[in-house]
Image (cartoon, rainbow, N blue to C red):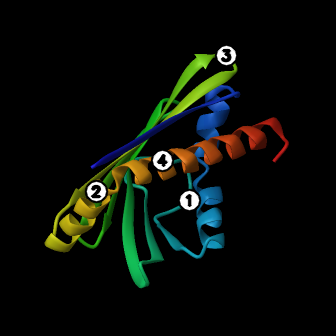
Amino acid sequence: MELKASEDIEAPIERVFAELADFEAIERQAMRRGVSVQRKGAAGAPAPGLSWTAGFTFRGKGRDAEITLTDYAEPEQMAFHSVSGGLEAATRIETVALSRGRTRITFVTELMPKTLSARLLVQSMKLAKGGIEKRFRHKMAGFAKDLELKLKGIG
């Protein structure tokens, strides 16, 4: 199952990508939302192989996820591979300069179930795909708006 959303931001591609690659800020934001995040390896310049362990609650149960940065090509794209139980996810974030001061961000996530319970979860998600896609696009739009305000110095 694939989820995809694109949003345009009034900011140069270099600044947008720098914000998307500010992993320390993203870690802090996740922790404020109740996710325990632990980076594996030294802090420094982002590069493939950088990884995190995250703990969170989903459907009333504690879950763990392993997230690995698999591709990093500044300022065009980065990709992640995540594993949580029997569910794997490949996430790609692409940035495209539409003009000197406008950037399009595209998020693509593909869910790949590896166990029967993960297949059942993904199958139920497919049945509700319209609503899930709508929420995904809505969250992406909110994220893009917040990012744009932050880059303008308003947020």
Q: Earlier in the sequence, mark 4 or mark 1?
A: 1
Residue depicted at x 36% and y 67%: 66
Q: Residue at x 70, y 28 (%)?
A: 11
Q: Which residue is mark 1?
A: 43
Alpha carbon distance from label 2 to label 4: 13 Å
Local packing at callout 1 (Cα closer than 10 Å; few below 14, some 14-19, many 20+) is few
Whether residue 54 is situated above or below residue 68 in the rendered picture: below
Which quadrant of the structure image shows residue 102?
top right
- Residue furthest to the bottom in view is 61
**Foreground mark, 3 or 1?**
3
Task: Provide the residue designation for mark 3.
Answer: 100
Tell me the distance, in whole angstroms, between the alpha carbons under discs 3 and 1. 31 Å
Q: Position of residue 92 (x, y in %)?
A: 40, 42
Secondary structure of residue under mark 1: loop
Could you tell me if the residues under marks 3 and 1 are in contact, i.e. CB atoms within 8 Å? no
Type of amino acid under label 2: Leu
Counting from the top left corner in percent of width and height, residue 114 is at 17, 64
Helix, strand or loop under label 2: helix
Residue under label 2: 127
Q: How many marks?
A: 4
Q: Are marks 4 and 3 in contact (CB under 8 Å)?
A: no
**Disc 2 or disc 3, which is closer to the eye?**
2
Residue 134: mark in rendering: 4
Q: Earlier in the sequence, mark 4 or mark 3?
A: 3
The tag earlier along the polypeptide, 3 or 1, is 1
**Residue contact between numbered discs 2 and 4, judged by CB atoms under 8 Å:** no
Which mark is in front, 4 or 1? Answer: 4
